[in-house]
Image (spheres, helix red, strand yellow):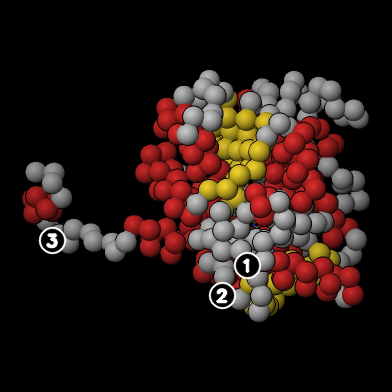
């Protein structure tokens, strides 16, 4: 077996790097495409989950960050800045320190999960708790990078999307072609844009560098109902959802995401917080995969469309689950309520009786 080298070395000829680019990698990518038997049964389709929570910092953000930080290093940056709901900042901090740069992270005050904040802390991030929401943080990050010597590594940086499109390459490499349908959560809208770029570039018909896919999938994106600017047709000023990763009202990649939706014949719709939490629980309890709330939005949307008769049977479907469940344990635990374990003596007979085994 061959060691996975990270997305830059695996897909170098399709990425904006040269021999002069210092590769900053944690060997991200190469994530498993896991068959989902319960979801397949529920939907009468062939469903796979692209499990991005196994990336080095626990989310898909590492794919884009390896490219963005490598390019920043090539350009001689000494500090990077990003706005984040928690995953981008964790990834930026990890890759920046590896490259010897200072990571400055702008986080909406009190609105990111404890584990994500801890990641920024342990990686030595310079942490700003901004009195505002994610959209305010992103505006601030842009302004700082325009005026001060600090490189912006949010997904408005095109190197981020370039790295993230490798997830689509991996799906095609694993399945032998694109699926019929690709489903994923939408927040700042970078990822749906990146997948569409990736699928588009990876077809046999791509202009400069043709790839192994014969076709492209339809793209279905799902937002949280309280933070669904694409569904409303414009920015939402006070976004609110239990899925803190996608609590975003003014997505940066607006035009690219609309193009992904329309050019693919797809859709962007919303799911409720209750549907998100139920899908998170079903993924944990049925498929054996613990993902964070935002990551369950795609699954919630797929189940909703299936249960309301709007999903054709027999399709091959890939759903990206974007981040690990351990990213937000408080929300998951709260959904299950108080934990009441069986308190048992350390003796097999009595324990077996209490646990219903005897
Ligand atoms: N899922 C997770 C776990 C995320 O962290 C994000 C975005 C998304 C989905 C949505 O992806 O923004 O490309 O549409 N998180 C960003 C962050 C905003 O700061 O970590 P998107």
Mark number displayed over residue 88: none
Give SS at disc 1. loop
Query: Is 160 placed above or below 212 here?
Result: below
Sequence-earlier tag: 2 or 3: 2
From the image, state whether disc 1 or disc 3 is nearer to you: 1
Q: Residue 285 at x, y = what percent?
A: 37, 44
Residue 329 shows in this picture: yes
Residue 172, horizontal then vertical, whole percent: 68, 28
The x, y position of residue 113, in whole percent, is: 53, 67
Specify the label residue 238 is tagged with. Answer: 1
Disc 1 versus disc 2: distance between alpha carbons?
15 Å
Q: Is there a contact, CB below 8 Å, between mark 1 and mark 2?
A: no
Q: Residue, x 29% and y 64% (percent of image)?
A: 338
**Foreground label between 2 and 3:** 2
Residue at 8% x, 54% y is 350
SS class of the residue under badge 3? loop
């Amino acid at each position: 077996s061959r060691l996975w080298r990270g997305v830059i070395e695996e897909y170098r000829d399709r990425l904006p790097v040269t021999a002069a680019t210092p590769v900053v990698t944690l060997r991200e990518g190469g994530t498993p495409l896991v068959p989902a038997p319960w979801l397949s049964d529920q939907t009468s389709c062939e469903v796979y989950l692209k499990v991005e929570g196994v990336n080095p910092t626990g989310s898909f953000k590492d794919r884009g960050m390896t490219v963005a930080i490598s390019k920043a290093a090539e350009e001689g940056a000494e500090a990077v800045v990003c706005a984040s709901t928690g995953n981008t900042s964790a990834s930026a901090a990890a890759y920046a320190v590896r490259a010897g740069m200072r990571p400055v992270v702008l986080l909406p005050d009190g609105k990111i999960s404890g584990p994500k904040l801890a990641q920024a802390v342990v990686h030595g991030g310079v942490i700003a708790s901004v009195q505002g929401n994610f959209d305010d943080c992103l505006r601030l990050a842009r302004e700082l990078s325009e005026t001060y010597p600090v490189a912006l590594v949010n997904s408005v940086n095109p190197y981020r999307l370039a790295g993230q499109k490798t997830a689509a390459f991996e799906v095609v490499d694993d399945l032998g072609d694109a699926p019929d349908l690709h489903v994923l959560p939408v927040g700042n809208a970078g990822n749906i844009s990146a997948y569409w770029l990736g699928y588009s570039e990876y077809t046999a018909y791509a202009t400069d560098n043709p790839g192994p896919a014969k076709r492209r999938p339809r793209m279905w994106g799902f937002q949280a109902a309280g933070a669904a600017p694409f569904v409303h047709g414009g920015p939402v000023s006070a976004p609110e959802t239990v899925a803190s990763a996608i609590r975003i009202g003014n997505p940066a990649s607006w035009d690219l995401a609309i193009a992904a939706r329309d050019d693919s014949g797809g859709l962007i719709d919303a799911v409720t917080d209750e549907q998100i939490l139920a899908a998170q629980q079903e993924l944990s309890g049925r498929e054996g995969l613990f993902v964070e709330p935002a990551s369950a939005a795609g699954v919630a949307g797929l189940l909703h469309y299936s249960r309301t008769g709007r999903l054709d049977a027999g399709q091959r479907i890939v759903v990206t689950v974007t981040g690990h469940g351990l990213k937000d344990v408080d929300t998951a635990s709260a959904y299950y309520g108080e934990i009441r374990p069986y308190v048992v003596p350390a003796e097999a007979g009595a324990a077996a009786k209490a646990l219903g085994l005897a």
